[in-house]
Amino acid sequence: MSPGPVPVELLQAAIREAKSEAMNDNEQKEQRVVVTDLKMPFGSMVVFLIKLALASIPALLIVWGVMMLLMMLFMALFGGIWGVNDLFHQPPQ
C-alpha cells in the first residue's frame, strides 16, 4: 500500500527545518577570502575592459546630470552671496 497524501503543514514544517539547518551550516562555514591572482586570457580581459568602459558611460552621464542639478540649485539659492550675478552684468555703454 502506498502512504496517503502528506499534510501541507508537515511539508511546510520540514521545509522550515531544512532552511534553518542550512542557514546554521552557512553561518558556521563562513570564511574570509583574499584573492592574490587572477588568471584570465588577454583577449577576455580586453573584452571585459571594453564592456566596463561602455557601461561606465551611462553612469557618468547620470552623475554629471545630478551634479548639474545641484550646481543650478546652489547657484539659484546662493549665487547673489558669491557675487556670481556680476559675471554676466553688462556695463552701460
Image (cartoon, rainbow, N blue to C red):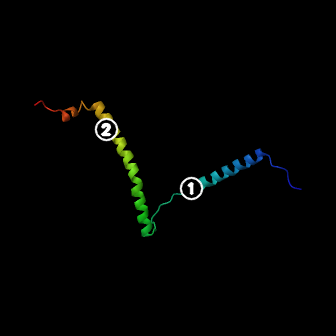
Residue located at (63% from left, 54% from top): 25
What secondary structure is found at the residue carrying circle 2? helix
What secondary structure is found at the residue carrying circle 1? loop
Which mark sits nearer the N-terminus, 1 or 2?
A: 1
- Residue 62 percent coordinates (x, y): 39, 45
- Tell me the quarter of the picture where residue 92 sits: top left
Mark 1 Cα-neighbour bin, 10 Å: few <14, some 14–19, many ≥20: few
Residue located at (65% from left, 53% from top): 22
| Residue furthest out toward the right | 1
Q: Amino acid at mark 1?
A: Glu
Q: Amino acid at mark 2?
A: Met
Q: Which residue is mark 2?
A: 71
Can you say whether 51 is above or below 62 in the image? below
Residue located at (22% from left, 34% from top): 84
Residue located at (34% from left, 42% from top): 67
Can you say whether 33 is above or below 78 in the image? below
- Tell me the quarter of the picture where residue 88 sits: top left
Q: Which residue is mark 1?
A: 30
Front-most of residues 59 and 90: 90
- Residue 16 percent coordinates (x, y): 69, 47
